[in-house]
Structure formats: C-alpha cells, structure tokens
Image (spheres, grey):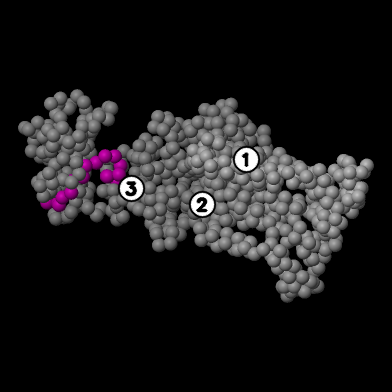
Amino acid sequence: MDSRVQLQQLSMSFGDFTAVHPLDLDIRSGEFFSFLGPSGCGKTTLLNIISGFLTPTSGTVTIGGEPMASVPANKRPTSMIFQNLALFPLMTVAENIEFGLEVRGISKPERRKVSDRLLELVDLTGSGDKRIDDLSGGQKQRVAIARALAVEPRVLLLDEPLSALDLKLRQHMRSELKEIQRRTEITFIYITHDQGEALTMSDRVAVMSAGRLQQVDEPMTLYQNPATPFVAEFVGENNRIAGEVVGNDNGRVQIKHPSLGVLEGISTEAMAPGTACSLYVRPERLRLVGEDASPVNRLQARLDVVNFEGAFLMLESSIEGLSDPLKIQTEHSTMPASLTKDHPVSLVFDPADALVMPESAAEGGGHAQGLD
Amino acid sequence: MLKALTDRFGLPVSVTILLLLWFWLIVLVILPQLIMIDYSFRPNLLPAQMGGPEDGYTIGNYQTLANNDIHRTIFFKTIWSSILVTFLTLVVCYPVAYFLAQLASTRQAMLIALLLVIPYWINEILRTFAWYLILAFQGPLNAVLLGLGFIDRPIRFLSGDSGVLIGMVYAYLLFMVFPLYNALESLDPNQVRAARNLGAGTIRTHWRIIIPHAKPGIATGCIMTFMLAAGSYAVPALLGSPGSRWFTQIIYNWFFEGGDWHMGAAYAFVLLILCIGFIALVMKVFKIGLGDIGR
C-alpha cells in the first residue's frame, strides 16, 4: 500500500493573510510524521488541506501517487482524529466506529465484525453498546482512534488529539498511538505544539513557524543540529548569547559579546567577521566548575533560582550584560551543597557543544501570529 | 422557591407577583375553560326553558358533531391540512435555519434574521391580505409565471387549499425557524466535518448527524406550527374558499352566527383535546419531554 503524501508548492492565503507560504514536502509511506509549531504557525491549515476541508491557494496534494485536487473530502483516503474528537453523542460506541462503513454500504454483520476487532485493538472489548457520554476521556480517545481506523485510511491525520488529557494518560496514549501505528503501517500525520509528543513519537518532525517550514528532520537531529535560530529556541531548552563574529577557522567560530568577551562555538556556515550572530548552548551542556577551570568559554554568574525537577535540578543564573538568565541543568550529585541562592558560580561549556548561527539564518523566524 | 423569591425581591413584591400569577392562571385560563366545558355539556335553551326539565347535562352537542358529515369532514380535513402545513413549514425552514446557524457569516445571519422578522412587524391580517393580492387570479404571481412561460393560463390559487397552505406556511415561518435555529446552532461544526471525513455525503450527514441533533428543535417547531395552524382563523377566512373551510370557522359560526355557545364550546373542546393529543404523540415519537420544548 503506497500511502506517501506529497505536498508540492503548496500555499494557503486567507485574504491578505498568508497562513502557509509555498512549501514542498514528501512524507514517506508508513511514517509517523509530526508538524510541530506554536499556535498560528499554519500546521492546522496544512492538515485541513490534506484532508480536503480547505482548498489550497496554490500547489498540489498527492496521496499514494494520486493527485487529490479533484477529490472531495468525503472521498479521500484520509481519516482525521479531531482535537475535540467529535464523536457522535447520539450513537453508541459501536455505531460511531461503524459509521464510515455504514456510509460505504457494508452490511450490519460485517460492520459488527470490524467494530469488534477494532474495539479489541484499542482495548475496549465489550464496550460497543455503551453511550459516548458514559466513557472516560481516555476511552473516548480510543473510540475516536477506532472510528478513524475503521475506514482503513491510507493516511491518519491527528489534530492535537491528546491535548485534553491529563499528563499520565497523555504519556500512556503516546506509546499506544505509536504501537497502533507500528501495527497498522498507516501513515500518521500528527499536529502538535507539544515538542515532547512530537519528539517521542515521530519518525520525522517538521518544525513550522509563521507559515514556513523551518526544518524537517529526525527528532534527534532537530535537537542536536537545529538549522535555524527558531528551531534552536523552540525545540528543547536553550541558552542564547548574542554577539558578533570575530574569528572563523574550519567550523570553529569565535564571537565577541560586549561584556562577556570572546566565546567559542561551532558553525556549519561560513560567517564573515562582523556578522551579527547567536550562540546557543543547551542547559545540560553548561557545567558548574571551580575557580581554577580552563578560561575558554568560562562565564561568571550569580545563582538566582534552584528548581527541583525530579530527576534533575534546573538552575537559573544571571550574568551582567545578558538580559535572559542562563539555565543550567545539573544532577543532584554534582551540585555542591554549599551552593545556594545569590552565590557566585563559574560555568563552562565545550566549544563543540555551542552552536553559532547568523542572526538572520532563516526567513520568517521568530514567533508567528495570526491564524492557527 | 418562595424563599428564593422573597430573598430576591422582598415579601410584598413576591406575594404580589405570585397573586397576579395565580389570578392569571385560575381566573383567566382555567376557570373560563371549565365554564366552556360545562357549557359544552348543556343544551342551548330559550330563557323560558332554563331551570325546566330539559335543563341538564347532555352529550347532545358532541353527537351533533359526530352525526354531521360536513362538520366531521371539515374537522378531519383541518387536522390533515394542519399536519401538511406543519410538514411544509419544516421543509421550507430547515434549510434556512441550517444556513443561518451553521454556514452564514455574522453579517449574513443578521441580514437574514432581519428580513425574516421585518414582515412580522405588520399585522397578521394585513400580511395575509398581501398574499391575497399576490395569489389573485390576475395578480403578480400569475403574471410572473405566465411571463416566464411556466404556465399557459393563470392558476386559481385562491379557490382550493393551496392559498390557505401558502398563507399558513408563511404566517408561521418564524415559529419554526427559531426553534430549529436554536437547536442547529448548538451543533459542533466538527461533527459535520467528522461525518464528511468518514465518507458521508451531504444527505447522509443531515439524516444521521444533523437532524438527530436538531430533533428537540424540530419537535418544538412542529408543535407550535401545528397548534397555530389548527387554531388559525384569519388565514382560512381570507385566503380560503367555500371548499377549503377550516374547523375554526365552524366554531366561529356556532358562537357568533348561530348564537349557540353550547354547540361552539363542544366543537372548540374537541379541537383542544385533539391538539393536546397531537402534542403528546409528537413528544412520544421524538422522545422528548416538556422541558425540551420550553427551551
């Protein structure tokens, strides 16, 4: 079954507002693919275009090699799980699941077989005759999944379906969704603003901002090698130090900050001296050290906040000349007991852990606004 | 309940409100009805015969209706035509209400609501007269249909039932549109999208998702329209012909032309019982309670 989804030169405008700038994207057959971005970045618009609820201003959608331009929403091989689930409250659980088959004229006994099988898949065996209102949030979620799978879609579209659940259930449903995807081999296209969801479940993630694709990559690559300042700041925690390029040799870049002096990082781009740039270093890459540590990339800061996060501590420390506090993630064991609030600390980071990017690396970076 | 009322408005105001309410309910609604029922079971006597041997309870008035072929026919025809009016009104109003509730932009919705309501600022008799003019043999509707070539000779709309049906559907539009609108407005648009996403076409989406959701609104609209149609006097009097007499006209005749209030009361009571029966039936069929109608 070919369930590749290709978007070619796809764009969408509402009046003067461009929700999606022209983009090309190839989603592989059987892939768990996520669109990640803040609300208003255009990800929901893309989902509505793929499902056929919206007609793109330009460009084409192809599913399994077939162009979708002339295929209406109710004839597409896609199935959607809505953010509010949109289960039919006047039908029983089984009737909900069987609705898509009823539409296709499949006989009642056949339909019952399918719904029984799907109820088993989502671990709700025997709940077919229940009313929707009698189910818990997690059970409704699973009925929505079963209903969407009943029509045997080639592509399953998920519009932030876990956002209404509590944390424990959300984490449980993550692994369940991933498991269902593995078993059914359907292409999953998942929309979320929650990077945890996107990073844990997806084969690949497209980070979007202001209607543009910022980066399409595997979760690990997104985290370790962000392509734009937006991705560096949006995916995971990051510390940003703005400066100006002063030296550059073989991927090693020296930048100068007016009050912190010269810092060193790595870059994939050749940047001429004088270029405005940002240096990004993750909280877990900043280390607390004694006064005698190496002078390269050493920062003197004052400890402001110690946040207990369970498995680790997240410290916030301020440095004169930096507007935002630096975040440092550290183990309980490496945290000297003598360190308390308002204590001076020394921090270092390895140049190999610091990524330097020119200030205007990507067009349309920064936070988006407008339609979701 | 009483405590909540006194807490809110103080004792004197609460007592006044309750007394007025009970006065209205007992003196202006229940008592007159009871007197009418009492009337309906007594013969129409000359003043001289009152208190005499013939002055007693009888079901003679009801027997008159049962034995009079013409009146009986008109009675059943009124019921049947009212059902037809109700059905036609539903068919006309459903698309309007759906558009208003789900598809229209705020501007469009306001404009349509305004266009629907403005004619109702005019008295019902005048509105019905306007239809009398429109539907006349040499009126504008026939002229337009002739001009467009749909018909070769004018139609006598006003000689059969069609004039009455058109007039009534129009007269009671709002009583159907607004309950439907209320019900449809609360439908989550994602329900429609979900049905479509699962492959349902327009008709099936309406039949399986939207109409079941709108059921309480449909029932309320149908009950109101039926009651108004069955009890209508002005529309059949103005737009009807001798062949399309309405039962209310017979009742009117007994009261004001025949001068026989007893007979009129019996006829009116039968109509009332029938209307209540219809409401009960509709509520049972649509599986709704009294509370749903009040909404």
Residue that mark 1 sits on: B291
Q: Residue furthest right?
A: B53
Q: Residue at x 57, y 41 (%)?
A: B15
Amino acid bearing label 2:
Phe
Marks counted in the figure total: 3
Is the residue A126 above or below the residue A349 in the image? above
Residue that mark 2 sits on: A53
Q: Quadrant of the C terminus of chain B?
A: top right
Quadrant of the image occupied by residue A202: top left
Q: Secondary structure at mark 3?
A: strand
User: Percent from the top left, x then y, of residue B127?
Assistant: 69, 65
Q: Residue at x 13, y 46 (%)?
A: A321
Same-chain status of marks 1 and 2: no
Is A173 in front, or is B136? B136
**Separation (CA) of disc 3 from disc 2:** 26 Å
Q: Within 10 Å of the Cα at label 3, are there few (<14), some (14-19), or many (20+) other Cα atoms?
A: some
User: For residue A165, which numbered disc appears in the image?
Assistant: none
* In the image, residue A279 lies in the stretch drawn in magenta: no
